[in-house]
Image (cartoon, rainbow, N blue to C red):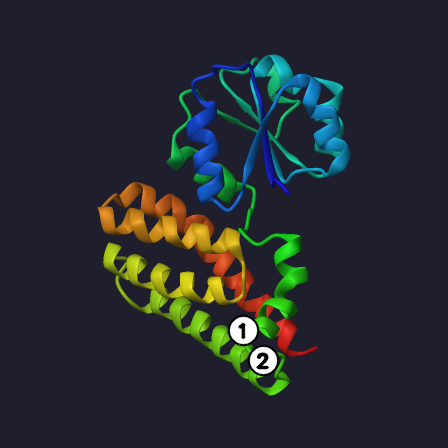
Amino acid sequence: MHSAFILATSGSAWIEPATQYLSDAGLPAQCVTATEAEAVLAAAVPRVMLAPPEIVATPLLQRARRQGALLVCVGRAQEDVSSLCDDVLTDPVTEEALFRLLARHQYVAISVSDRAGLANAIASQTFGDAALAAELVEALATSTESDLDRLQEEDDSLETWRSVAHRVKASAHLARCEGFQRLAQRLETVARGGDVRLTGALAEVFVPTAHEFRAMLLASACK
Protein backbone atom coordinates (compact mmCIF):
# COMPACT_ATOMS: atom_id res chain seq x y z
CA MET A 1 0.00 0.00 0.00
CA HIS A 2 1.26 3.47 -0.89
CA SER A 3 1.04 6.18 1.76
CA ALA A 4 1.29 9.03 -0.73
CA PHE A 5 0.42 9.64 -4.31
CA ILE A 6 1.46 12.14 -6.91
CA LEU A 7 -0.96 13.22 -9.62
CA ALA A 8 0.78 15.29 -12.27
CA THR A 9 1.43 15.57 -15.98
CA SER A 10 3.95 13.04 -17.20
CA GLY A 11 7.38 14.60 -17.53
CA SER A 12 6.97 17.13 -14.72
CA ALA A 13 10.50 17.66 -13.40
CA TRP A 14 9.49 17.68 -9.73
CA ILE A 15 7.92 14.19 -9.72
CA GLU A 16 11.09 12.10 -9.39
CA PRO A 17 12.74 14.08 -6.56
CA ALA A 18 9.46 14.44 -4.68
CA THR A 19 8.91 10.68 -4.89
CA GLN A 20 12.34 10.06 -3.39
CA TYR A 21 11.87 12.64 -0.63
CA LEU A 22 8.51 11.17 0.33
CA SER A 23 10.02 7.70 0.47
CA ASP A 24 12.79 8.96 2.75
CA ALA A 25 10.09 10.42 4.99
CA GLY A 26 8.46 7.00 5.28
CA LEU A 27 5.79 7.71 2.67
CA PRO A 28 6.09 5.32 -0.28
CA ALA A 29 4.64 7.30 -3.18
CA GLN A 30 2.78 6.17 -6.26
CA CYS A 31 2.64 8.35 -9.38
CA VAL A 32 -0.78 8.10 -11.01
CA THR A 33 -2.56 9.54 -14.03
CA ALA A 34 -5.93 11.23 -13.84
CA THR A 35 -7.61 8.06 -15.12
CA GLU A 36 -5.86 5.91 -12.51
CA ALA A 37 -6.54 8.24 -9.59
CA GLU A 38 -10.14 7.23 -9.02
CA ALA A 39 -9.31 3.53 -8.66
CA VAL A 40 -6.35 4.30 -6.37
CA LEU A 41 -8.41 6.52 -4.08
CA ALA A 42 -11.28 4.03 -4.03
CA ALA A 43 -8.91 1.43 -2.59
CA ALA A 44 -7.50 3.62 0.19
CA VAL A 45 -7.10 7.28 1.07
CA PRO A 46 -3.38 8.16 1.17
CA ARG A 47 -1.85 10.23 3.93
CA VAL A 48 -0.40 12.78 1.48
CA MET A 49 -1.29 13.85 -2.07
CA LEU A 50 0.83 16.08 -4.32
CA ALA A 51 -0.66 17.74 -7.39
CA PRO A 52 -0.09 20.84 -9.56
CA PRO A 53 -2.40 23.90 -9.30
CA GLU A 54 -4.57 22.92 -12.27
CA ILE A 55 -5.47 19.59 -10.66
CA VAL A 56 -5.92 20.27 -6.92
CA ALA A 57 -9.46 21.57 -7.38
CA THR A 58 -10.79 18.34 -8.94
CA PRO A 59 -13.67 16.79 -6.98
CA LEU A 60 -11.75 13.52 -6.60
CA LEU A 61 -8.87 15.15 -4.71
CA GLN A 62 -11.17 17.37 -2.72
CA ARG A 63 -13.13 14.32 -1.58
CA ALA A 64 -9.93 12.58 -0.48
CA ARG A 65 -8.93 15.75 1.35
CA ARG A 66 -12.21 15.74 3.26
CA GLN A 67 -11.51 12.12 4.17
CA GLY A 68 -8.23 13.10 5.80
CA ALA A 69 -5.56 13.19 3.09
CA LEU A 70 -3.09 16.09 3.22
CA LEU A 71 -3.39 17.83 -0.16
CA VAL A 72 -0.29 19.73 -1.27
CA CYS A 73 -0.20 21.98 -4.32
CA VAL A 74 3.13 21.95 -6.16
CA GLY A 75 3.81 25.14 -8.09
CA ARG A 76 2.60 28.71 -8.08
CA ALA A 77 -0.95 28.63 -6.75
CA GLN A 78 -3.42 31.48 -7.18
CA GLU A 79 -5.40 32.57 -4.13
CA ASP A 80 -8.52 30.69 -5.21
CA VAL A 81 -6.50 27.47 -5.54
CA SER A 82 -4.64 27.95 -2.25
CA SER A 83 -7.91 27.68 -0.35
CA LEU A 84 -8.47 24.26 -1.89
CA CYS A 85 -5.25 22.69 -0.60
CA ASP A 86 -3.60 22.29 2.79
CA ASP A 87 -0.17 23.63 1.84
CA VAL A 88 1.97 24.67 -1.11
CA LEU A 89 5.42 23.63 -2.31
CA THR A 90 7.26 25.73 -4.83
CA ASP A 91 8.72 24.13 -7.93
CA PRO A 92 11.49 22.91 -7.92
CA VAL A 93 10.66 20.89 -4.83
CA THR A 94 13.48 20.65 -2.29
CA GLU A 95 13.92 18.00 0.37
CA GLU A 96 14.20 20.59 3.11
CA ALA A 97 10.95 22.28 2.07
CA LEU A 98 9.08 18.99 1.94
CA PHE A 99 10.22 17.89 5.40
CA ARG A 100 9.40 21.27 6.94
CA LEU A 101 5.94 21.06 5.35
CA LEU A 102 5.38 17.61 6.83
CA ALA A 103 6.50 18.89 10.24
CA ARG A 104 4.04 21.79 10.03
CA HIS A 105 1.24 19.28 9.67
CA GLN A 106 2.39 17.12 12.61
CA TYR A 107 3.31 14.18 10.40
CA VAL A 108 4.91 11.19 12.13
CA ALA A 109 6.52 8.35 10.20
CA ILE A 110 4.48 5.59 11.83
CA SER A 111 1.57 4.15 9.88
CA VAL A 112 -1.62 2.41 10.90
CA SER A 113 -0.15 -0.85 9.60
CA ASP A 114 2.98 -0.32 11.75
CA ARG A 115 0.79 -0.06 14.84
CA ALA A 116 -1.34 -3.04 13.88
CA GLY A 117 1.68 -5.17 13.10
CA LEU A 118 3.78 -4.36 16.17
CA ALA A 119 2.74 -7.40 18.21
CA ASN A 120 3.53 -9.78 15.35
CA ALA A 121 6.83 -8.02 14.68
CA ILE A 122 7.92 -8.42 18.29
CA ALA A 123 6.68 -12.02 18.43
CA SER A 124 8.71 -12.90 15.35
CA GLN A 125 11.84 -11.51 16.97
CA THR A 126 11.30 -13.48 20.18
CA PHE A 127 10.08 -16.81 18.77
CA GLY A 128 6.66 -16.38 20.36
CA ASP A 129 8.05 -16.25 23.90
CA ALA A 130 5.82 -13.78 25.78
CA ALA A 131 8.42 -13.04 28.46
CA LEU A 132 11.11 -12.32 25.91
CA ALA A 133 8.67 -10.18 23.92
CA ALA A 134 7.93 -8.06 27.01
CA GLU A 135 11.65 -7.64 27.65
CA LEU A 136 12.29 -6.59 24.05
CA VAL A 137 9.49 -4.03 24.08
CA GLU A 138 10.78 -2.58 27.35
CA ALA A 139 14.34 -2.47 25.99
CA LEU A 140 13.23 -0.67 22.81
CA ALA A 141 11.17 1.86 24.76
CA THR A 142 14.01 2.49 27.23
CA SER A 143 16.56 2.85 24.44
CA THR A 144 14.37 5.34 22.58
CA GLU A 145 13.81 7.35 25.76
CA SER A 146 17.56 7.42 26.34
CA ASP A 147 18.16 8.67 22.81
CA LEU A 148 15.56 11.42 23.19
CA ASP A 149 17.11 12.45 26.50
CA ARG A 150 20.49 12.61 24.81
CA LEU A 151 19.13 15.03 22.23
CA GLN A 152 17.92 17.24 25.06
CA GLU A 153 21.10 17.07 27.11
CA GLU A 154 23.88 17.18 24.55
CA ASP A 155 24.85 19.90 22.13
CA ASP A 156 22.86 20.00 18.92
CA SER A 157 25.75 18.64 16.88
CA LEU A 158 25.63 16.70 13.64
CA GLU A 159 27.49 13.83 15.30
CA THR A 160 24.81 13.58 17.99
CA TRP A 161 22.07 13.44 15.37
CA ARG A 162 24.01 10.85 13.36
CA SER A 163 24.59 8.64 16.38
CA VAL A 164 21.02 8.85 17.67
CA ALA A 165 19.56 8.20 14.22
CA HIS A 166 21.78 5.15 13.84
CA ARG A 167 20.62 3.68 17.15
CA VAL A 168 16.95 4.44 16.57
CA LYS A 169 17.14 2.96 13.08
CA ALA A 170 18.00 -0.41 14.63
CA SER A 171 15.07 -0.18 17.04
CA ALA A 172 12.66 0.70 14.24
CA HIS A 173 13.95 -2.27 12.27
CA LEU A 174 13.26 -4.67 15.15
CA ALA A 175 9.72 -3.28 15.46
CA ARG A 176 9.30 -3.44 11.67
CA CYS A 177 8.38 0.23 11.46
CA GLU A 178 9.72 0.61 7.94
CA GLY A 179 8.82 4.25 7.46
CA PHE A 180 10.54 5.29 10.67
CA GLN A 181 13.53 3.16 9.75
CA ARG A 182 13.84 4.94 6.39
CA LEU A 183 13.53 8.33 8.08
CA ALA A 184 16.24 7.46 10.61
CA GLN A 185 18.50 6.17 7.83
CA ARG A 186 18.09 9.40 5.88
CA LEU A 187 18.79 11.53 8.96
CA GLU A 188 21.90 9.50 9.69
CA THR A 189 23.14 9.93 6.12
CA VAL A 190 22.45 13.67 5.97
CA ALA A 191 24.03 14.34 9.37
CA ARG A 192 27.11 12.37 8.36
CA GLY A 193 27.29 14.45 5.18
CA GLY A 194 27.39 17.70 7.18
CA ASP A 195 24.22 19.38 5.89
CA VAL A 196 23.07 21.40 8.91
CA ARG A 197 19.89 22.88 7.40
CA LEU A 198 18.61 19.59 6.02
CA THR A 199 19.48 17.79 9.25
CA GLY A 200 17.35 20.35 11.09
CA ALA A 201 14.43 19.82 8.72
CA LEU A 202 14.60 16.04 9.08
CA ALA A 203 14.87 16.38 12.85
CA GLU A 204 11.55 18.25 12.94
CA VAL A 205 9.87 15.03 11.80
CA PHE A 206 12.24 12.58 13.47
CA VAL A 207 11.81 13.78 17.06
CA PRO A 208 7.97 13.66 17.14
CA THR A 209 8.12 10.28 15.44
CA ALA A 210 10.56 8.97 18.05
CA HIS A 211 8.22 10.15 20.81
CA GLU A 212 5.29 8.46 19.09
CA PHE A 213 7.34 5.28 18.60
CA ARG A 214 8.13 5.15 22.32
CA ALA A 215 4.47 5.79 23.21
CA MET A 216 3.39 2.99 20.89
CA LEU A 217 5.83 0.59 22.56
CA LEU A 218 4.68 1.55 26.05
CA ALA A 219 1.04 1.11 25.05
CA SER A 220 1.88 -2.30 23.68
CA ALA A 221 3.57 -3.28 26.92
CA CYS A 222 0.39 -2.48 28.86
CA LYS A 223 -1.76 -4.90 26.87
Residue displayed at 54% across by 42% down: 27
Relative to 165, residue 128 above or below: below
| Dot 2 amino acid type | Ala
**Numbered disc in front, either 1 or 2:** 1
190 sits to left or right of 59: left
The answer to whether any part of residue 70 appears in the image is: yes
Q: Which residue is mark 2?
A: 133
Quadrant in which the N terminus is drawn: top right
Real-space Cα distance between discs 1 and 2? 8 Å
Q: Residues within 10 Å of mark 2 (few under 14, many from 20)?
A: many
Q: Residue furthest front?
A: 127
Quadrant in which the C terminus is drawn: bottom right
Q: Secondary structure at mark 2?
A: helix
220 sits to left or right of 166: right
Relative to 198, residue 78 above or below: above
| Dot 1 amino acid type | Gln
**Residue 72 vs residue 172, the one in the foreground:** 172
Instruction: Tell which circle, 1 or 2, labels the residue nearer the N-terminal end.
Output: 1
Residue 130 picture quarter: bottom right
**Residue 148 vs residue 129, the one in the foreground:** 129
Cβ atoms under marks 1 and 2 closer than 8 Å = yes
39 sits to left or right of 159: right
The answer to whether any part of residue 67 appears in the image is: no
Residue 79 picture quarter: top right
Can you give x and y, in whole percent of width and height, for residue 208 in the image?
50, 56
Residue displayed at 42% across by 26% down: 93
Q: Which residue is mark 1?
A: 125
Q: Secondary structure at mark 1?
A: helix
